[in-house]
Image: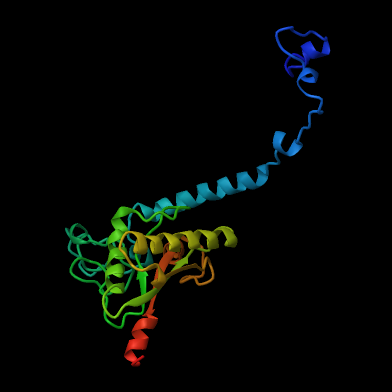
Amino acid sequence: MLAEMGKLLPTLNVTSDKFPKVSDLTDDPLAHNPESICPKYDVGATIDRQAFLQKKQLQDSAYMSVTAMPRYLDTPALNTSSNFQDDDGDGIANEDDGCPATPAFTDVDATGCTKYQPNTSNVEIGIPFSADSSEVRPQYMQEVQRLADFLTQPPNKRVEIQGHASLEGPALYNRKLSERRAFSVAQILTQQYGVSPSRVKSLGYGTDQPKIPEISVRANAANRRIEAIITESNSSLAASNGF
């Protein structure tokens, strides 16, 4: 046992002249910090967290295999032709759809992306996130670019990017996750598409504002979303009032 612990030779007072003793190196006693040697580790919480993520991954795969959320919201397809495939139900065929996850009842253009009007003030951005992730995948960047184009058209607009989460899982964790997702979209607007950071704000609402107050594949798809609240910038309001 002492040999396994590395204490056999010191116990037998067997030393080598090749190596100095600790007492030869310093007069200060050796101090050991138990927290650094054996840090506390909450095994139960870690196992619970892993089980939650595994369950969430299984549920996510049920609807992430199809990229569009509206299908899970039972939105009827606008074209019932057997050869016509429209995963997000916006009337644009998959092969022609530049925005493959447009939320239900969104007014879209010929490319299947959100159509903005001068008075547009509230838009849900179709970005299905992977489980426990805040990464905006490339196939959904087109919708973020459309929002950026609208924000930079005169008169300049302000936007609040709001992140929302499904009701499943710890509320505090979901709030932090929704904050990261909203920040990811805001960061793309400012860093990739040149929208002034002074006109972009991001907030995470977690589970506070669910579209469907339940835990299910259908509800999770609807509740895990990004919304953009668009207002006039202060400079534009000042100009319109003659300031």
What is the x, y in percent for residue 19? 71, 12
What is the x, y in percent for residue 105? 31, 74
In the rendered image, which quarter contains the N terminus? top right
Q: Quadrant of residue 80?
A: bottom left
Q: Is residue 106 visible?
A: no
What coloring was used for the rendering? rainbow
Q: Quadrant of residue 95?
A: bottom left
Q: Quadrant of residue 192?
A: bottom left
What is the x, y in percent for residue 176? 54, 60
At 82% from the left and 10% from the top, the residue drawn is 13
At 82% from the left and 25% from the top, the residue drawn is 27
At 43% from the left and 53% from the top, the residue drawn is 60
Can you say whether 53 is above or below 215 in the image?
above
Compared across the picture, whether 54 is left or right of 160 comes to right
Q: Is residue 202 visible?
A: yes
The residue lying toward the viewer, choosing from 147 and 30, is: 30
The residue lying toward the viewer, choosing from 229 and 211, is: 229
Compared across the picture, whether 206 is left or right of 130 comes to right
Can you say whether 106 is above or below 118 in the image?
above
What is the x, y in percent for residue 181? 44, 60
* Number of numbered discs on residues: 0
The residue lying toward the viewer, choosing from 200 and 147, is: 200
Residue placed furthest toward the bottom: 242
In the rendered image, which quarter contains the C terminus? bottom left
